[in-house]
Image: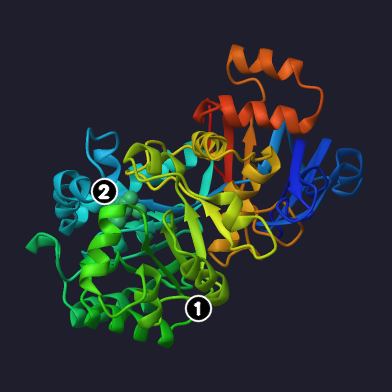
C-alpha cells in the first residue's frame, strides 16, 4: 500500500540559483498550491486544482495561506554545545577554553549525550530545521547517541565524532590511531544506514597533529562518499596560531590541502579571513563553506564576504549555518536575518530568495545532498515546513503591506522566529506540529 498525502497552501520552490539568475525568476510561488507526497517523496507540486483532481481519495491537509517550503538545512552546528549557548564575553580561543571544552567533557556519558541529542533535535524540528551537519564531541558514544536520536525520528542528519589529539584538556583527546579507528567504525555503522550521513570531523587544524590530519585524509580516501567538516579562518588569533603550528604550509587552507581534506563534500565553517590564494584554492578544489553569521557576530570573529565568494563569475558553494553554540540561535529565520545584516554592513544586499536558498538548497548543496533534499520538487525527499505568514501581530501587520510574495518572504525573514513554524515534515511524516 502506498502512503500518500496532499498538503495545500502557498508553495515556495526554486527553479534556478538566485545568485546566478534574477532572484525573482529563480524562486517560484504558487499562491493556491499543493504538494502531493507519496512514500516519503514529493510526487508532484503545482496549482491545488490540478493536484487535487489527480490525487483522488488521497488525504488532504489544508494549511490555508501558510507557506510550504523545503525544510531548513543547517550545514554547521555543534549539538553538545547547546547548554553553553549565550556564554558571555569571550572570542574564539578563550571561548573554547572557558566554556566549550568543559561542556564537551561530559559527553563520554552516553545517557548525557542521548539527552542532549534529543533536546537538540526537538529544538531543531520546532525551528523547522530538518537536516543539519553536526559535530559531536571526541567521544564516539556522542556520535552514536546523535545518530540513534536522528534515526529514531527518521531524519536525514550528518554527524561525526570530533578528531582532536592536541591542545585540549586530556579528557577530550584521542590519538591519530584511535581517532581514525573510532571514526571508521562509526562511519561503517552509520553512513548510509537509514538516512544517516557520516562526516569525518577534524575539529580544526590547531587541535590535530599532522599525523591525525593525515589519518583523517586517509579515511576520507577510503570512504569518499562521506562528508568532511572542519573550521577555517574564523578568527585572527586562530590564523596566527595555525601559521606557527604549520610553518611549511602557505596558509590555513593549505594545511587542509596538504592532508587531502579538501574537495567536494568538504564543508569549511566560517572562512572569514581568506587570502586570494585561499579563495582560488577553495574554488579550484570544489570545497564548500558554511556561513555562520550569528556566530561570527556573537563571538566577534568578523564579517563574511558572501558577495565576494558566492557571487561573481567564480562562485564557491555556500550554505547557511547556526554554528550553535558559538551561534546564538537555532532558528534559520534569525540566521537569515543575521546574514542580511552582515551583508548590509559590508555594503552588499541579499535578496530574500538568496537568503531562503542559502538556508535550504544552498546548504543541501554544500552537504552534497541537493539531489535528495533542499527543494520542493518531484523525487525529492518530503522534508518540508509549513510557515504561518502571520505568527505575531506585528508580522501580520507588516505582511498586510506586502504587495508581492518576495516582500512577504522578506518580512518573514527579518521578523519571524520559531513561532512561525506550524508544522515540520520529515520523509513525508509530520514530526513536529504547533498546538
Ligand atoms: N573552532 C574550533 N572549534 C570550534 C567550535 O566549537 N566552534 C567554533 N565556532 N569554532 C571552532
Ligand atoms: Zn563550529
- In percent of width and height, residue 433 lies at 54, 34
Q: Is residue 63 visible?
A: no
> 342 and 153: which one is in front?
342
Rate crowding at label 2 as few (under 14), some (14 to 19) or many (20 or more) other CA atoms within 10 Å. Answer: many
Find out if the beta carbon at label 2 lies less than 8 Å from the nearest ligand 1 atom.
yes
Instruction: Give the distance between the C-alpha atoms of the residues marked 2 and 1, in whole angstroms.
Output: 31 Å
**Label 1 residue SS:** loop
Q: As drawn, is 194 to the left or to the right of 298?
A: right
> 141 and 401: which one is in front?
401
Give the residue number, with chain letter if any, for mark 2. 92
Q: Nearer the viewer's eye, disc 2 or disc 1?
A: 2
Q: Tell me whether the residue at label 2 lies in contact with that at label 1, contact meaning CB atoms closer than 8 angstroms.
A: no
- In percent of width and height, residue 63 lies at 71, 30
> 218 and 269: which one is in front?
269
- In percent of width and height, residue 76 lies at 43, 54
Q: Is residue 154 above or below residue 301?
A: below
Image quarter for residue 9?
A: top right
> 51 and 265: which one is in front?
265
Q: Is residue 36 above or below residue 213?
A: above
Residue at the spot x=30%, y=75% of the render? 183
Residue at the spot x=27%, y=46% of the render? 81
| Quadrant (top left/top right/bottom left/bottom right) for the N terminus | bottom right
Quadrant assignment for ligand 1: bottom left
Image quarter for residue 315?
A: bottom right
Residue at the spot x=27%, y=50% of the render? 80
**Label 2 residue SS:** helix
- Identify the mark nearer the N-term, 2 or 1: 2
Q: Which mark is residue 225?
A: 1
- Number of dots carrying numbers: 2
Amino acid at each position: 500500500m502506498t502512503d500518500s498525502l496532499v498538503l495545500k497552501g502557498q508553495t515556495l520552490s526554486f527553479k534556478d540559483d538566485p545568485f546566478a539568475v534574477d532572484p525573482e525568476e529563480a524562486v517560484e510561488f504558487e499562491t493556491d498550491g499543493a504538494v502531493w507526497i507519496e512514500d516519503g517523496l514529493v510526487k508532484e507540486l503545482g496549482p491545488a486544482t490540478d493536484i487535487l483532481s489527480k490525487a483522488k481519495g488521497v488525504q488532504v491537509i489544508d494549511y490555508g495561506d501558510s507557506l510550504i517550503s523545503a525544510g531548513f538545512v543547517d550545514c554547521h552546528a555543534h549539538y553538545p554545545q547547546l547548554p553553553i549557548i549565550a556564554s558571555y564575553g569571550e572570542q574564539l580561543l578563550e571561548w573554547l577554553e572557558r566554556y566549550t571544552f568543559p561542556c564537551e567533557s561530559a559527553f563520554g556519558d552516553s545517557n548525557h549525550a542521548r539527552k542532549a541529542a534529543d533536546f537538540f533535535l526537538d529544538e531543531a524540528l520546532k525551528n523547522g530545521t530538518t537536516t543539519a551537519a553536526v559535530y559531536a564531541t571526541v567521544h564516539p558514544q556522542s556520535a552514536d547517541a546523535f545518530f540513534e536520536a536522528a534515526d529514531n525520528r527518521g531524519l536525514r542528519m550528518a554527524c561525526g565524532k570530533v578528531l582532536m589529539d592536541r591542545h585540549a584538556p586530556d579528557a577530550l583527546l584521542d590519538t591519530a590511531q584511535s581517532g581514525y579507528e573510532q571514526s571508521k567504525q562509526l562511519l561503517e555503522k552509520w553512513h548510509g544506514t537509514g538516512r544517516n550521513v557520516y562526516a569525518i570531523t577534524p575539529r580544526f587544524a590547531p587541535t590535530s597533529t599532522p599525523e591525525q590530519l593525515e589519518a583523517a585524509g586517509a579515511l576520507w580516501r577510503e570512504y569518499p562518499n562521506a562528508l568532511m567538516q572542519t573550521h577555517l579562518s574564523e578568527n585572527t588569533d586562530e590564523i596566527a596560531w595555525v601559521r606557527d603550528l604549520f610553518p611549511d604550509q602557505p596558509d590555513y587552507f593549505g594545511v587542509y590541502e596538504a592532508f587531502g581534506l579538501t574537495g567536494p563534500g568538504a564543508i569549511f565553517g566560517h572562512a572569514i579571513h581568506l587570502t586570494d590564494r585561499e579563495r582560488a584554492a577553495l574554488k579550484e578544489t570544489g570545497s564548500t563553506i558554511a556561513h555562520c553569521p550569528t556566530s561570527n557576530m556573537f563571538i566577534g570573529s568578523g564579517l563574511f564576504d558572501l558577495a565576494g565568494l558566492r557571487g561573481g563569475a567564480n562562485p564557491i558553494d555556500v550554505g547557511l549555518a547556526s554554528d550553535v553554540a558559538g551561534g546564538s540561535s537555532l532558528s534559520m529565520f534569525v540566521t537569515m536575518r543575521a546574514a542580511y545584516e552582515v551583508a548590509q554592513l559590508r555594503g552588499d544586499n541579499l535578496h530574500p530568495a538568496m537568503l531562503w536558498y542559502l538556508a535550504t538548497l544552498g546548504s543541501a548543496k554544500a552537504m552534497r545532498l541537493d539531489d535528495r533534499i533542499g527543494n520542493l520538487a518531484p523525487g525529492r525527499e518530503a522534508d518540508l515546513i509549513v510557515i504561518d505568514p502571520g505568527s505575531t501581530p506585528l508580522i501580520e501587520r507588516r505582511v498586510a503591506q506586502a504587495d508581492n510574495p518576495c516582500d512577504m518572504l522578506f518580512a518573514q525573514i527579518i521578523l519571524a522566529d520559531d513561532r512561525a513554524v506550524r508544522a515540520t515534515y520529515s520523509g513525508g511524516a509530520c514530526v513536529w506540529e504547533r498546538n
